Amino acid sequence: MVSPLASVIDPSRLTSIVQDLVRIPSVNPPGSERGVADYLLNLLKEWGFQTRRIDVPFRDRPQVLAVLPGSNKRPPLILNGHMDVVPEGDPEEWTDPPYAGTIRDGCIYGRGSCDMKGGIGVALEVARALQLSGMPLEGDLVLAFAVGEETGEPGTKTLLEESGYTDGFGIVLEPTGFKLGVAEKGLAWLRITLKGKPAHCSIAEQGINPIDQFLTLGKAIKAYDEKIRKRVHPLCGPAKCTMTILRSGTKENVVPESLTVTLDRRMNPDEPVETVREEIDQILTGLASMDPAFSARLEVTRLYEPAEISPDLPQVGILAREIEAVTGKEAEIWGTPYSTDVRNFINDAGIPAVTFGPGQIAQAHAFNEFVAIEDLVRGARIILGTAERLLL
Ligand SMILES: [Zn+2]
């Protein structure tokens, strides 16, 4: 049954807030979320929420915490969204200006409409509706709006530390098309540098050619990729290791002095993070033992750990029932193939959390990005129903 409170959701308020948010560009890089943070802080203050402007980890990029307080009989529900958006790219590719927030055919268009100012709008609308209902809460409803998600910066991680909460339940309102993400893959970027010895190509044998060495290394990595693809997670699918950047050489007639190859490694929640580096290290050590001239350096240049919670948690069940009540379809328990700040809840703060929100992931980062207003309203009804069952 859809929550009776759902009628408190105001589609026109929700729509105009999301339009407002889209109209304040908050592109990252370089990290210009400040305008959105100011807007949110002003609005929440006007509504009478307890608000905090968080000036860490970046002094000039404020983050937002707001609380609708409960009586502390039950743990909090934390709604999270990132304020930053990816750059709009070539404006010529957009039918409407990317920051106009145009409404057409029941959809709001613009950079960030789907990823994820729509989700932030839903969090605000749920908070406002609960507040206006006047119902006393037994647990806090917390809004946590972060910087730097698109570039993997520690926005949400810091926000959760600053909030002081150590329990409860989190919902990261990324667009999932209403699929319920309880697990997500991790990501590591690794860079291998092979050291060569330059020589004039007329006497090439006097040098050490890292491209020759790569012929063996590349095959070994390909074999490694095939091996780890057999590690299949029930929700996230196979682990993967893909070679993505290859660089070497300075001139046509010179044996190169070095070669670098970059790997994109997608890891499953059941793979220990340390194995990512260790397994590549083993490949390199093996090759060095066969060729004394083989000299490799390995660096991990980015690491987002995987994360997962049990789909059997009661909060997941409650959310799933609300999804079903509002959409009329059984909730799809899902492993998100991309990384979100949910790992900061689960791995860093120890708070169980899911990735769930309105909008299609295909729209995120795309030209002519849009979100359907009907999906925003349905999203708000689902989250409000969940909040009611967790906090009232
Ligand atoms: Zn996002």
Image (spheres, rainbow, N blue to C red):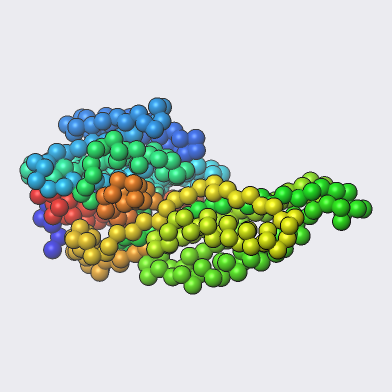
Q: Give left or right: position of 8 versus 235.
A: left
Seen in the picture, residue 391 relative to 327 is either above or below; the reply is: above
Q: Position of residue 252 (x, y in %)?
A: 84, 50
Instruction: Decide which of 252, 322 is in the foreground and name it.
Output: 252
Q: Position of residue 359 (x, y in %)?
A: 35, 55
Q: Within the image, what quadrant is residue 63 found in? A: top left
User: Does any portion of residue 12 appear in the rendered image?
Assistant: no
Instruction: Decide which of 102, 379 is in the foreground and name it.
Output: 379
Query: Residue at (60%, 69%) from the top-left corner?
Result: 223
Q: Position of residue 178 (x, y in %)?
A: 31, 60
Seen in the picture, residue 155 relative to 223 is either above or below; the reply is: above
Q: Give left or right: position of 189 versus 361.
A: right
Seen in the picture, residue 314 relative to 369 is either above or below; the reply is: below
Query: Residue at (37%, 70%) from the top-left corner?
Result: 234
Instruction: Decide which of 112, 197 is in the foreground and name it.
Output: 197
> Hey, which residue is sitting farthest right in the picture?
202
Q: Quadrant of the N terminus?
A: bottom left
Q: Within the image, what quadrant is residue 13 found in? A: top left
Instruction: Decide which of 250, 192 is in the foreground and name it.
Output: 192
> Hey, which residue is sitting farthest bottom in the picture?
230
Q: Within the image, what quadrant is residue 160 found in? A: top left
Query: Residue at (45%, 44%) from the top-left corner?
Result: 152
Query: Residue at (71%, 56%) from the top-left corner?
Result: 294
Q: Position of residue 2 (x, y in %)?
A: 15, 60
User: Does any portion of residue 242 appear in the rendered image?
Assistant: yes
Q: How many marks?
A: 0
